[in-house]
Amino acid sequence: MAVELGKRIITSIILFLIAIFCILIHKFVFVSILIVILFISFNEWRDINYKYFKKKQHNNWKYFFVQFVGLVYLFIFLSTSIALRGNNSESIAFFIIILCICIFSDIGGYVFGKVIGGKKLTKISPNKTISGSLGSFIFSLLPLFLFNFQNYFDSHFDLDFKVYNWAFVSVPSEYETFNFEISLKSILFCLIISLSCQLGDLFISYFKRLNNVKDAGTVLPGHGGLLDRIDGIIFAIPTAFILIFTQIYLY
């Protein structure tokens, strides 16, 4: 368990650092790499479903419909990622925070699921447990407290870590209704993002189970496909977009 957890954490850190690099360097680079990632993910999605629908010779239209749904949703993920990333440091900061919530949620689910175990959450994914789901919700709150602790540390010790202030504490002015301070609204935001991550994981797991396959691909040796690592994020980013802009336009 410790070895697998270590691999998961290391993989998450590496992917996170790569993501940060892509997000920060330039918007054009960010979009270009994101398109490549989605191209690989779509190929994995196509391969997963091809094995299943190949057995159903009279269901070709269903196969193409499922591929179309996957393509549309990946496009939604792409467009909402570009919108949330924005063009200024504040929107970039908030995008990074959302990624942190997703990563902590994934790690929390794995840790609680392995350490506590217990009753299965659903038949869709036998490895998912109720305790793991609870762990995802709990860990998703850690970024909220960590970023606010850093803000407290800065203000009380008169330190000015510009990288931290720029990357983690600043709140996008256009998203001012989502001030990332410890509040009921911020807590609910984290929990909803965690829920969307879990739903994204279960969604992909359902189709993998139809094909009786463990991993979506082999792009990441020892960790499966790229889709296995970003399935939750693909659901979380559009969810964050809806939450933020619902607040802006309805209140």
Image (cartoon, grey):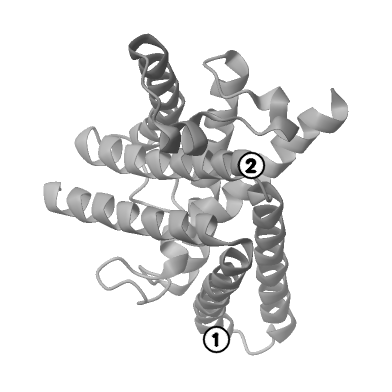
Mark earlier in primary sequence (1, 2): 1
Seen from this angle, which residue lies furthest top?
A: 156
Q: Are marks 1 and 2 in contact (CB under 8 Å)?
A: no
Going 39% across and 44% down the picture, which residue do you hit?
Answer: 106
Disc 2 residue crowd, few under 14, some 14–19, many 20+, Cα 10 Å: many
At mark 1, the secondary structure is loop
Q: Examine the rendered structure and indicate whether residue 43 appears above or below residue 69.
A: below
Which residue is disc 1 drawn over? 55
Quote the CA–CA distance across marks 1 and 2.
46 Å
Question: Residue 60 occupies which quadrant of the picture?
Answer: bottom right
For marks 1 and 2, give the one nearer the viewer.
2
| Residue 42 % position (x, y) | 57, 75
Percent of width and height locating residue 89: 59, 43
Which quadrant: the C terminus?
A: top right
Q: Nearer the viewer, residue 133 or 18?
A: 18
Q: Which residue is mark 2?
A: 91
Q: Residues within 10 Å of mark 1 (few under 14, many from 20)?
A: few
- The spot of residue 238 in percent (x, y) is 67, 49
Q: Residue at x 58, y 38 (%)?
A: 94
Q: Is residue 202 above or below residue 72?
A: above
Q: Amino acid at mark 2?
A: Ser
